Image: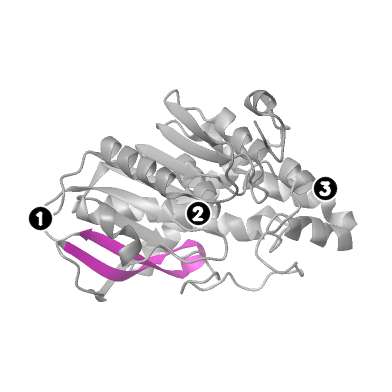
C-alpha cells in the first residue's frame, strides 16, 4: 500500500517520542480556570446576533463568545427552529480558515442538531488575534509565543475550543449529554484537544488532525504549516529545545491520552501536510476503547464526498437527533 511515510504495518505500530511535560495537567487546569474566570467576568459570555438568513426549519445566527484573556471570539450558531433539547456539535475549522458558515452545516441542523462553529483567533474569520508577545516569530501562527508555553498562540486557541464546547453545553435548547466535536486538519486537532480539555463531548470525529507529534512532523514534513517551525529554528537554532518544550503542551498526541469518549479519525496515506505517522501517533494514544481509524490509501490532505457521507451518518447515529420540521 503506497504512502509518503512509513509502510502501513509500521504506521500501526508506530510509537511517538515521549514529550509530555510533568506539569501538563496543572498547566491546562490553570489555563481553563483562567478562561472560565474571564468568561464569568465578561457579562456576555455568549451573544447571539440577529437571524442571518432564511433556512427552512433552521435558525442561523452570527454569535460571539468570550475566550481566554477576554477576547471576543466570533462564530456561527445554526440550530433547529423548534423543539429540543437538541444534540449539539462544536465544529472547528482548518488552518488559516474560518468557522463553518450556515450553509456548510445546514444539513446537520436540518437533521435536528445544534451546531456551533468558532473562528480561530487572527485567522480568516472575525476573531481578533492575541495581543503583543515578547519576541518575533515566523509568518503564520505556529511560532507565535514559542519561547513560553503561557504565551503560545495555541494555548489560547485550545482554551477557546474547550470554552466553545462548554458554551454549547450551557444552552437551554441543547442536551449537554449529547454533544460531539468535529473538524479537519487544524480542526481535527482542536476537536481532539477540546474533547480532552472539556471532558464533555460524547463523541469526537477528527479528520487528518494537525498539531500532532511535533518532533516527527517537523522532521519529515516538506510543506507548510509545519515548515513554519523548521524555518524559524533555522534562523534561531538556539531556541530549538525551548520551542519543542512549548509545543509539547499543545501536542494533540499528548492530549489524546485524555480523550475517553468514543472517537473516529481518518488518515490519508499520501498526506504531506499532516503525515500519516503523526495521525497514527494521536490515534494510538486515544484512551477510548471505542475508537476506529479510517485509512485512505490514495488520499492526500483532503476530505472526499465518501468520507463526508460516512462522517455525517456516524454523527447522526451517535447523537440520535430528530430531523427538523
Colour scheme in use:
one colour
Q: Residues within 10 Å of mark 1 (few under 14, many from 20)?
A: few
Could you say where residue 214 lies in the image, as x and y percent from the top left?
70, 45
Q: Is residue 80 left or right of residue 169?
A: left
Q: Secondary structure at mark 3?
A: helix
Q: Which mark is residue 241?
A: 3
Q: Does 251 lie within the magenta span?
A: no
Q: Is residue 13 above or below residue 40?
A: above
Whether residue 53 is visible: yes
* Residue 45 shows in the view: no
**Dominant SS in magenta:** strand
Q: CA distance from mark 2 to mark 1?
A: 35 Å
Q: Residue at x 69, y 25 (%)?
A: 10
Mark 1 and mark 3 lie on one chain; the one further toward the N terminus is 3
Q: Residue at x 54, y 47 (%)?
A: 189
Q: Which is nearer the N-term, disc 3 or disc 2?
A: 2
* Magenta region includes residue 59: yes
What is the spatial separation of the Cα atoms under label 3 and label 2, in whole angstroms? Answer: 24 Å
Instruction: Indicate the position of residue 99 as horizontal and vertical percent values.
Output: 43, 64
* Residue position marked by numbered label 1 in the rendering: 325
Q: Write down the region rendered in magenta.
A: 58-79
Left or right, 234 with respect to 7, comes to: right
Side of 267 relative to 140 (left or right): left
Q: Is residue 247 or residue 108 the one in the foreground?
A: 108
Residue 306 occupies which quadrant of the picture? top left
Mark linked to residue 159: 2
**38 and 99: which is toward the camera:** 99
Q: Which residue appears at 59% of the width and 56% of the height? A: 154
Q: Position of residue 152 (x, y in %)?
A: 65, 59
- Nearer to us of marks 1 and 3 is 1
Amino acid at each position: 500500500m503506497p504512502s509518503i511515510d512509513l509502510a502501513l504495518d509500521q504506521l500501526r505500530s508506530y510509537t511517538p517520542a515521549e514529550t509530555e511535560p510533568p506539569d501538563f495537567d496543572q498547566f491546562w487546569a490553570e489555563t481553563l480556570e483562567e478562561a472560565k474566570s474571564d468568561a464569568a467576568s465578561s457579562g456576555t459570555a455568549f451573544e447571539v446576533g440577529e437571524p442571518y438568513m432564511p433556512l427552512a426549519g433552521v435558525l442561523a445566527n452570527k454569535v460571539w463568545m468570550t475566550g481566554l484573556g477576554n477576547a471576543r471570539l466570533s462564530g456561527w450558531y445554526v440550530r433547529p427552529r423548534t423543539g429540543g433539547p437538541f444534540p449539539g456539535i462544536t465544529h472547528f475549522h482548518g488552518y488559516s480558515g474560518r468557522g463553518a458558515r450556515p450553509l456548510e452545516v445546514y444539513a446537520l441542523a436540518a437533521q435536528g442538531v445544534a451546531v456551533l462553529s468558532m473562528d480561530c483567533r487572527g485567522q480568516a474569520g472575525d476573531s481578533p488575534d492575541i495581543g503583543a508577545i515578547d519576541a518575533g516569530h515566523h509568518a503564520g501562527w505556529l511560532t507565535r509565543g514559542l519561547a513560553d508555553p503561557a504565551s503560545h498562540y495555541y494555548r489560547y486557541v485550545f482554551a477557546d475550543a474547550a470554552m466553545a464546547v462548554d458554551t454549547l453545553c450551557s444552552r437551554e435548547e441543547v442536551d449537554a449529554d449529547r454533544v460531539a466535536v468535529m473538524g479537519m486538519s487544524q480542526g481535527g486537532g482542536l476537536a481532539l484537544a477540546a474533547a480532552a480539555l472539556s471532558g464533555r463531548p460524547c463523541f469526537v470525529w477528527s479528520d487528518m488532525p494537525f498539531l500532532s507529534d511535533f518532533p516527527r512532523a517537523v522532521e519529515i514534513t516538506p510543506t507548510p504549516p509545519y515548515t513554519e517551525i523548521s524555518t524559524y529554528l533555522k534562523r534561531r537554532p538556539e531556541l530549538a529545545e525551548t520551542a519543542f518544550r512549548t509545543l509539547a503542551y499543545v501536542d494533540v498526541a499528548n492530549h489524546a491520552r485524555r480523550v475517553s469518549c468514543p472517537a473516529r479519525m481518518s488518515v490519508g496515506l499520501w498526506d504531506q501536510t499532516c503525515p500519516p505517522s503523526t495521525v497514527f501517533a494521536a490515534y494510538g494514544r486515544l484512551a477510548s476503547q471505542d475508537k476506529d481509524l479510517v485509512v485512505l490509501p490514495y488520499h492526500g490532505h483532503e476530505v472526499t464526498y465518501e468520507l463526508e457521507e460516512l462522517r455525517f451518518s456516524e454523527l447522526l447515529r451517535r447523537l440520535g437527533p430528530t430531523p427538523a420540521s
